[in-house]
Amino acid sequence: MSELRNLLDTIEVYKPDFDPEIVEKAYLYAKEKHEGQFRSSGEPYYLHPVAVAQIVAEMKMDVTTIITAILHDTIEDTDATFDDLKEKFGKDVADLVDGVSKLTRIESQTLEGKQAENFRKLLLAMSEDIRVLLVKLADRLHNMRTMGGIKKPEKRRRISLETLEIYAPLAERIGIHCIKEELEDLCFEQVNPEARESITNRLAYLRDGGGAVVNDIIAELANILKDAGIDAEIKGREKTRYSIWKKMQRKNVAFEQLSDIMAFRIMVEKVEDCYLVLGTIHGKYHSVPGRFKDYISTPKPNGYKSIHTTIMGPRRQRIEVQIKTKEMHDEAELGVAAHWAYKGDGQSKNRDVTKYRWLRELLEILEQEQKPEDFWEHTKLELFQDRVFVFTPKGDLIELPNGATSVDFAYAVHSDVGDKCVGAKVNGRIAPLNSRLTNGDQVEVITAKTQNPSPTWERFVVTGKARSHIRKYIRNQQRDEFIILGRAMIQKIFRQEGYDFSEKSITGTLKHYKLENNEDVYANIGSGMFVARDVFKLIFPSHKSDTLSRPPEHMDQATMAERPDNSDGPMPIKGLISGMAMHFARCCHPLKGDRIVGIITTGTGVTIHTIDCDTLENFADTPERWLDVSWGDESKDLQVGRLLITMANEAGALGTISTVIARNGGDITNFKLKNRTIDFWEMIVDVCVTDTKHLNNVIAALRATPSMISVARACGN
Ligand code: MN
């Protein structure tokens, strides 16, 4: 129980009026739930969450956070549920523990190094309440402190590298700078103990060998500025072993060449004072050439202002100094807060100032991670609450705007994947393409070679990439149709006026229209930009005919479709656009007498389907491709009807079928055995008939045949 006593004592120091009973209740609950569980070191498991609570208490967090820390592994590792916690400890605690559990689950994803940045953003985005992240960091710190319990060196190394990449940067300067440094130092010990040892010795030698330490230098700088009559606030620190090592690596320099074992910030009231400080310091110490930067006269693009310089400081050590006004300092900090307030929705009004601070500091971390040289610098950063981070099946993280769907994801992976996607699995389950993704989802896109972008996707995608690809496809598709239509229209006029159509004559108009190629002309005619007869007149200016003196026909698709075509002799189908190729769909084999519809298909003209054909569902979203058509009276052509026949597997059965069909005036044009068992034959038979009535006669005759099981018109392939 001493660990509970310690915890209660720690809390009492900063929260004398807290209720110890609720903390004790959580302690007993965790102890009971983790009963029988042990850590790899062999000690009872419950000691871990209590130690995490101790860390959180040392950060002076509220009691809710401390209880969350005590319970942080119960949902994930015991039979406790969200509802149990809600009932016993209230909704706040249950929500927070649930949040920590989500991070724990995400944590188990393995990541490549370059994904660290996105992973940090994911953790941020998932930590709707920043206390969730704090508990997670404390959890990680305790795990790192007790790492000796893990036997395998490679596992210790992997966890350490992950901590360095993900958690230490997150912990940095969240008011818990010491935890970031402790994390880094613990990792450093695992990853490179020799380097750590060597830097430790160098630092000790520096201090013992008469080098100045931070407080000495602050005191000396303060004296110099005081003598110069400048009122200034000075802060400084020695860099950690790990950050020194990182810099040595990055700059590829030896320890002695490092200029910034120590860094100092001098803050003054007025801008003039900054230059006064600079002059005073440069007057007293030598400055290191090439290290001076005046971001006051020339602020950085993000508005950052400060003077940076490196001097040979007291006792001839190189030190980094940043000089700025308090206003500049606050501006940099508030800039981020202002950004948050601006970006936030109505919700942000409910967030108290403390939360702004947490957030601001978190943003600073990420910014600092990208530019570690600018030690004290703060800049504005994008917030991640409006982003969503999802995993590919390989574990890569993809960043998308909030509200993104599987289609957005598919296009983010690759535009080809987007164009060909037919479905998606979210967390292993088939999900609609328009379902919105949430943080940490794993998404797998299902593609099909035959799929094309659907115009309906445009209604729900949120990324520009997805939208632009879908639009581009629709535009191209429309253009293709306009070309077919336009060409059909101009060809028809040629025929009506008794001319042979030639591509060459169209090419002759290109210069006049300032167009590139014939297809451009057809597309313009098809889309109604050009009147087909005007194009004809341009080609044959001297041609006179009655037809041409008539007012130009309205050439849009709908009216064309209603007009029965009679210019080309008898046509089996009425309502077609003349000149457009027509053929019967193989999926439904329409026969005269069936109700039919035409579908304009790129490159192949019009395909005739029966009105109840399943294939038509594919065109539900493109009504502009539908053509109202009907059977022409003149049609005498024979047509093919497809039958699905099942019969008993008996000798002579096939002979019977062909005899029956022939006797009824039909003609077998194709035959395919679909399935054959000991008992049955299932086959597809294409029969040439005059119309549906004729085919129905054939079907009736077949049904009357002995050993016949069933006969029906085939649907689909
Ligand atoms: Mn834990």
Image (cartoon, rainbow, N blue to C red):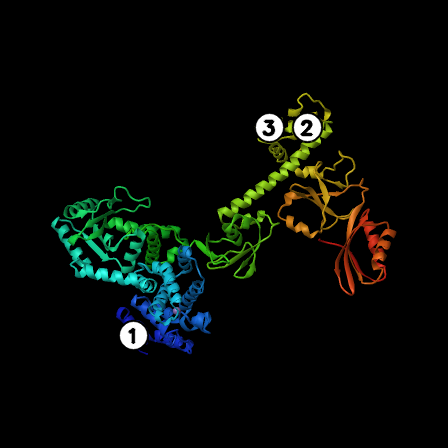
Quarter of the view holding residue 48: bottom left
Lower position in the chain sequence, tag 2 or tag 1: 1
Residue visible at 58% across and 48% down in the picture: 454
Residue 576 in the image, given as x and y percentages of width and height: 72, 39
Observer-side mark, 2 or 1, equals 1
Q: Residue furthest right?
A: 663
Q: Amino acid at mark 3?
A: Leu
- Which residue has dot 2 on it? 551
Residue 582's disc is: none
Can residue 130 be seen here? The reply is no
Observer-side mark, 3 or 1, equals 3
- Which residue has dot 1 on it? 6
Residue visible at 37% across and 67% down in the picture: 139
Task: For marks 3 and 1, give the CA distance.
Answer: 89 Å
Task: For marks 3 and 2, give the CA distance.
Answer: 25 Å
Residue 505 in the image, given as x and y percentages of width and height: 65, 27
Observer-side mark, 3 or 2, equals 3
- Which residue has dot 3 on it? 510
- Label 1 Cα neighbours within 10 Å, binned few <14 / some 14-19 / many ≥20: few
- Could you say whether the residue bearing mark 2 is in a helix, strand or loop? loop
Q: Amino acid at mark 1?
A: Asn
Lower position in the chain sequence, tag 3 or tag 2: 3
- Could you say whether the residue bearing mark 3 is in a helix, strand or loop? helix
Quarter of the view holding residue 536: top right
- Label 2 Cα neighbours within 10 Å, binned few <14 / some 14-19 / many ≥20: few
Q: Nearer the viewer, residue 330 or 409?
A: 409
Lower position in the chain sequence, tag 3 or tag 1: 1
